[in-house]
Structure formats: structure tokens, C-alpha cells
Image: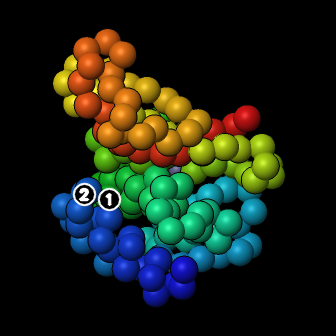
Amino acid sequence: MTNHELQQLVEQISVQFFAKPFKHHAYFNSRLRTTGGRYHLDNHDIDINPKMDDGAAHEVLIGIIKHELCHYHLHLAGYSGKHNTPQFKQLLKAVGGSRYAPRLASKESFHIQYLYRCNHCGLEYHRKRRINVAKYVCGRCRGKLQLVNSYLEKQ
Ligand SMILES: [Zn+2]
Ligand SMILES: [Zn+2]
């Protein structure tokens, strides 16, 4: 994925999930080593660790972009946008962002977790593998499952 494509993806996620435009710059920064992404308080740009470019579905990448956009939109709305604030936690949950931009000791020590939610009763399922939602249903109510989010988690 190029920087240009990353920029487009961030703009698209911003409008789709936050209903607000992203008016600054997003780019890959290979000097980011220990974190998946970073929001710059000084110039409002977002940089993303190129290791987060995780293939065609961009599941990890999108989770991280949402996380950084939470910082972005809260900061521009006058909040601190820090992780431990209720505003941050609420917004992150609402848009389904990664809980944290993963600290990368090494990429191997993380795996992708998929979060599914039952459309009927709301029960959540955290799985290390994708579920075939055409085949599997909710264990509690037999409702349909939907992929809500994916994120990196420590092994
Ligand atoms: Zn963060
Ligand atoms: Zn259910």
C-alpha cells in the first residue's frame, strides 16, 4: 500500500465511522518500531508503522487507523484524547478501534484477534481465527454472527 492509498483509506474511515473529514496527512513511517501508529499533537498528522500493512483485508491496519482517528477527532474537538479518558474509551468502542496501538516488541509476539458479535443477543466472541459466519451461529440464541473488529493481541 502506498502513502497515497493510506491517505485515502484514512479519509474514508474518518467519514464512514466518525462522520467527520480527516483534513491532515497520513503516511507510513518505518522509523516507528515499537508502536503501530502515532498521532501528532503538534501538526495533527498520523503516521503508521508499515508493518501494520497486513494484506488485502487490512483488518489490523483499519483497527489502528480508527484508534489514531479517535486521538485526532477528540483532540480537534478540544479533549485531551488520552487513552485513559472516558471520551477516548467511549469513542474507541463506538467505532471498533484497536484497544491500543500495539507495542511491537516483535511482530511474532502478537496475533490477530477477531471480535464477532451476535446480531440478535449481542453476545461477543473473541477468536484467533476467522469464523465462517454463514455456517456458525450464536451459541446462546442461534442468532447470526457479525465481524465487528479485529485487533492485535499479545501472545
Ligand atoms: Zn493511542
Ligand atoms: Zn445470540
Asked if labels 2 and 1 touch by Cβ distance under 8 angstroms, the answer is yes
| Gap between marks 1 and 2 measured at Cα | 8 Å
Q: At x 25% / y 57%, what residue is drawn?
A: 18
In percent of width and height, residue 57 lies at: 47, 62
- The N terminus - image quarter: bottom right
In this picture the colour scheme is rainbow
Q: Hey, which residue is sitting farthest front in the picture?
A: 135
The residue that mark 1 highlights is: 73
In percent of width and height, residue 70 lies at: 38, 53
Q: At x 58% / y 36%, what residue is drawn?
A: 128
Q: At x 27% / y 19%, what residue is drawn?
A: 142
Which one is earlier in the sequence, the residue at label 1 or at label 2?
Answer: 2
Mark yes or no: residue 33 visible: yes
The answer to whether residue 25 is left or right of residue 73 is right
Q: Nearer the viewer, residue 78 or 19?
A: 19
Residue type, label 1? His
The part of the image, by quadrant, that contains residue 110 is: top right
The residue that mark 2 highlights is: 18
Is 84 above or below relative to 62? above
Asked whether mark 2 lies closer than 8 Å to ligand 1, one says: no
Mark yes or no: residue 93 visible: no
The answer to whether residue 46 is left or right of residue 28 is left
Secondary structure of the residue carrying tag 1 is: helix
Secondary structure of the residue carrying tag 2 is: helix
Q: Nearer the viewer, residue 145 or 25?
A: 145
In percent of width and height, residue 138 lies at: 33, 22
Residue type, label 2? Phe
- The C terminus - image quarter: top right
In percent of width and height, residue 40 lies at: 52, 67
